[in-house]
Image: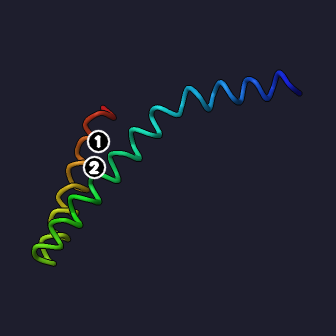
Amino acid sequence: MLEKLKSVGRLAAAAAPAVLRDAAGLAGAGMVAHGAAEIYAPAGWIVGGIMLLAAAWLAARSAR
């Protein structure tokens, strides 16, 4: 049981940097979109949509 717990811990530690990187990227994108919305409300939706399109394009490109 303890060995299985250790292997799960190692797996979580290996995955943590990728999860933290993705969380930081999502938070940053949200902050940029919110900042644009503070200036002009429709700009927030436009910026958020552009970021989603860019993320989808990059994900599709890396899947090749």
Q: Position of residue 30 (x, y in %)?
A: 29, 60
For the image, the number of numbered tags is 2
Give residue 6's mark: none
Name of the residue lying farthest toward the right: 1
Q: Secondary structure at mark 1?
A: helix
Q: Is residue 52 above or below residue 23?
A: below
Q: Residues within 10 Å of mark 1 (few under 14, many from 20)?
A: few
> Mark 1 belongs to which amino acid?
Ala
Residue drawn 47% across the image and 40% down it: 19
> Residue 62 sits in which quadrant?
top left
Q: Is residue 59 above or below residue 45?
A: above
From the top left corner, tell me how far across and down residue 58 is, in percent.
24, 41
* Furthest residue in direction top, as rendered: 3
Helix, strand or loop status at disc 2: helix
User: Residue 45: where, in percent of width, then height?
Assistant: 20, 71
Closest to the observer, 31 or 59: 31
Say which residue label 2 marks. Answer: 56
Q: CA distance from mark 1 to mark 2?
A: 6 Å
Which quadrant holds residue 22? top left
- Give the label on residue 60, or none: 1
Residue visible at 34% across and 52% down?
26
Q: Is residue 42 left or right of residue 64?
A: left
Residue at x-position 30% and y-position 31%: 64
Specify the amino acid type for callout 2: Ala
Residue at the (62%, 32%) spot, across then down: 12
Cβ–Cβ under 8 Å for marks 1 and 2: yes
Vertical position of residue 43 compared to residue 13: above or below = below
